[in-house]
Amino acid sequence: MSTDPELDRTRRFSAAEVKRLLGITEPSADRLFARARVVLGQDRADQCLQLARLAPLTRRWVPTGAVAGLVVGTLELGQEWWTRPHEELTHSLQWSVRGVPDAVLMSMKVDPELDDSGSPLAALGRWISDDAADRKWGRPVDVVDVSDPRVDGRVAVPAHAMAGDRVTAIVSPGVRIWVDVVERAPDSGAHPSTGRARLGTRLADRVRHESAEVVSAWTIAMSASPIRLPGEVPGRASDPFSVQIDHDASRRLYDWARSHGATAQELGTPWRTKDALWSARLRMGLPYSRPGAWIDFDDAIAGAVDDDRAALFDSLDALGI
């Protein structure tokens, strides 16, 4: 565990959410893929596992989180979701066919528009979260950037809408915001051709579908140790985290962390393997618990674990070591 009590509490809460949403008592990739075999079917689960193996070690939370979302989404939408074309609302407010989930999964192709960490799993996770949200709350009428602070007038009044109607807009995959159709203040005048009061829209509460919630919960719950996929045994040849790392770079990183406030408990023994380095990184609560130059330190760790020597040595240079 980390030395940050708040982070540990967040991880425990997230593990409880994984249990609630997936029925997995203790989160692990083995249990996740066992659940996927039951819900998605053997062939889809096997394909998901193959795609997950393509991800960099430091980003395995992306494909495994997507699998968690696909399990929850499939439980709601049924197996037929995989065989129907997925439609997406574009920023021009047109519905566009993006592909058939089964075809995308089985293609093993890395489409730049779908790619996240080496596979289309993340895109499929976004698709199913959106479709599950549409099933639950209705199709959205717009896409909203919530960084814009305005509440009124962000969404055009839908055709045939009346005051008191409520529709939804997209915030992010699986996340919607209620949009209320309201009458504008009396001093705003009446519609010139009908004499009726003008209508406007006002943003209300956000809602998040469980297929999106489980992705966040899974990611945080699994942030305490390396994510090993089924068949990978710690310390054995099958374990990609058991690989030795550059000892000189490791020593420089270890000494830098110790001189910048990392505790002996966080550091552990000198880092010889990817497992030791990545586990120490998680104990230190990176990247969120430490600011400033620790960002370059975190980039160096990712470079070492993912065998990206250019990123590793660029980051060491940035740290001045």
Image (cartoon, grey):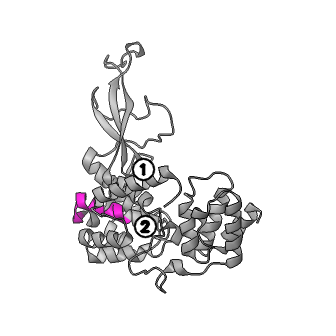
User: Can you say whether 81 is above or below 38 in the image?
Assistant: above
Q: For mark 2, does the 10 Å Cα neighbourhood hold few (<14), some (14 to 19), or many (20 or more) residues?
A: many
The segment highlighted magenta reads 67-80
Residue 171 shows in this picture: yes
For this view, does 26 lie left or right of residue 296? left
Mark closer to the observer (2, 1): 2
Q: Nearer the viewer, residue 284 or 37?
A: 284
Res. 90 mark: 1
Q: Where is residue 182 in the image (x, y as percent from the top left)?
A: 33, 25
User: Can you say whether 89 is above or below 153 in the image?
Assistant: below
Q: Nearer the viewer, residue 274 or 199?
A: 274
* Residue 281 is inside the magenta segment: no
Q: What residue type is labelled 2?
A: Pro
Query: Regarding mark 2 in the picture, which secondary structure is present there?
Result: helix
- Residue sitting at x 51%, y 59%: 2
Q: Where is residue 130 in the image (x, y as percent from the top left)?
A: 34, 53
Labels 2 & 1 near each other (Cβ < 8 A): no
For this view, does 187 lie left or right of residue 321? left
Q: Where is residue 24 in the image (x, y as percent from the top left)?
A: 30, 64
Seen as rendered, the residue at the extreme bottom is 237
How many angstroms separate mark 2 from mark 1 (CA)?
Answer: 24 Å
How many dots with numbers? 2
Q: Mark 2 points at which residue?
A: 63
- Residue sitting at x 33%, y 68%: 32
| Dominant secondary structure of the residues highlighted in magenta in the image | helix
- Is tag 2's residue or tag 1's residue first in the polypeptide sequence? 2
Seen as rendered, the residue at the extreme front is 264
